[in-house]
Amino acid sequence: MVDEQGFAAYPAPAKLNLFLHIVGRRQDGYHLLQSVFQLIDMHDTIYLRLRRDGQIVHHNPLPGVPAELDLTVRAARLLQPKGSDWGVDIRVDKRLPMGGGVGGGSSDAATVLLALNQLWQLQHSRVDLMALGLSLGADVPFFIFGQNAFVEGIGEIMTPIETPPRYFVVLHPQVHVSTPEIFKDPLLTRNSPSIKVGDLEGAVTRNDLQACAVRKYPEIAEQLNLLQQFGDARMTGSGSCIFVEMPSQAAANTVLCGLLESINGFAVQTLNRHPLYEYAK
Ligand SMILES: C[C@@](CO)(OP(=O)(O)O)[C@H](O)COP(=O)(O)OP(=O)(O)OC[C@H]1O[C@@H](n2ccc(N)nc2=O)[C@H](O)[C@@H]1O
Ligand SMILES: Nc1ncnc2c1ncn2[C@@H]1O[C@H](COP(=O)(O)OP(=O)(O)O)[C@@H](O)[C@H]1O
């Protein structure tokens, strides 16, 4: 678990939004959504090493993200008790597409909160960590919750749901979708009917953000067309990643192998629980 430099490895898994409906808007302009968040086995790895000088040091900042703005560093700062001599060295092995709608940054932050809560012996409850996480991003509480969930509000209301094991092909069109721009689109559907968790089975679902993303980014439309030959392909979150269900891991791999080399994709399997689920009580 601990490497020769003293770093321990912690996984930060991705999610897919199996659907995403916009059902209203708050006074502050934030949109109210309903979505099923599904954990998948594609992940970043966060390496952490304890320090006792109170410093939080990021050893390999991501291109275009200064260390102080990285969600891992922000999560550690948020958790660090005032005046504490607990510190940490951070390294991130980034595998998840950034700004791809698979929640990579949020999951990195959640993993840091879960791991440091233990390493720094803080004993915050899961609920407290979720509340702290929400100030870093709307998806962070879900990863701390650690179970597949029907998610409402702006991401803070969660009902655990059982989802069957499934396989997906996930493609990453090489475009950066601006989340605020999509939410500002005058053509965005903002009044999808609200559904109840008990009515999920058999409900007709979609991603309401997808139509706006497809209009603005032809690369997403092209790759959606490509995946649609295999099933009900759709976008996750505010994009740009898209996904389609496959009957098996082998079938997902076969589809990936048949794609042009210029297309970036992954074959993934669902997770039942976050790998660090037991880190919070
Ligand atoms: C829609 C989701 C679903 O998972 O997309 P992804 O981030 O995964 O793609 C998330 O909830 C995204 O939430 P979050 O990650 O906090 O979005 P941000 O980039 O911080 O939001 C940027 C801007 O989008 C708008 N915004 C965001 C979320 C929301 N529920 N309503 C909004 O209106 C706000 O104007 C906000 O300032
Ligand atoms: N550790 C991190 N990993 C990814 N993105 C980060 C991280 N820290 C800060 N960010 C910023 O957050 C933005 C959104 O990241 P990400 O979570 O990957 O997108 P999404 O929510 O669409 O999945 C990035 O474009 C980047 O500027």
Image (tube, grey):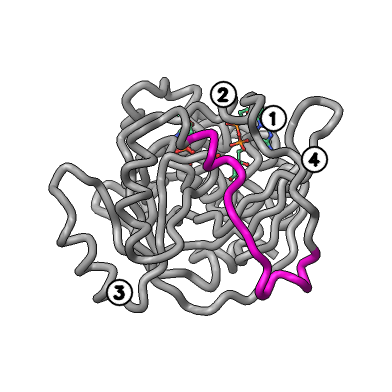
Q: Nearer the viewer, residue 212 or 88?
A: 212
Give the residue at x 38% y 40%.
Answer: 220
Give the residue at x 63% y 37%.
Answer: 137
Task: Calculate the distance from the C-alpha at mark 1 to the C-alpha at mark 4.
Answer: 38 Å
> In this image, 248 relative to 73: left or right?
left
Q: Nearer the viewer, residue 85 or 184?
A: 184
**Mark 4 vs mark 3: which is more N-terminal?**
4
The residue indicated by pointer 4 is: 24
Q: Amino acid at mark 1?
A: Lys
Give the residue at x 66% y 25%.
Answer: 186
The residue indicated by pointer 2 is: 181
The residue indicated by pointer 1 is: 82
Q: Is residue 207 above or below residue 40?
A: above
Task: Calculate the distance from the C-alpha at mark 2 to the C-alpha at mark 4.
Answer: 17 Å
| Span highlighted in magenta in the image | 196-213
Mark in the foreground, 2 or 3: 2
Task: Calculate the distance from the C-alpha at mark 1 to the C-alpha at mark 2.
Answer: 37 Å
**Mark 1 vs mark 4: which is more N-terminal?**
4
Q: Is residue 25 above or below residue 264?
A: above
Q: Amino acid at mark 3?
A: Gln
Q: Are marks 4 and 3 in contact (CB under 8 Å)?
A: no
Task: Calculate the distance from the C-alpha at mark 4 to the C-alpha at mark 3.
Answer: 37 Å
Q: Nearer the viewer, residue 4 or 202?
A: 202
Residue 253: image location, x then y, percent = 23, 68
Q: Secondary structure at mark 3?
A: helix
Q: Secondary structure at mark 2?
A: helix
On whether residue 29 falls in the magenta region, the answer is: no
Residue 249 numbered tag: 3
Mark in the foreground, 3 or 1: 3
- For disc 1, the neighbor class at 10 Å (few under 14, some 14 to 19, many from 20) is few
Mark in the foreground, 1 or 4: 4
Q: Are marks 3 and 1 in contact (CB under 8 Å)?
A: no
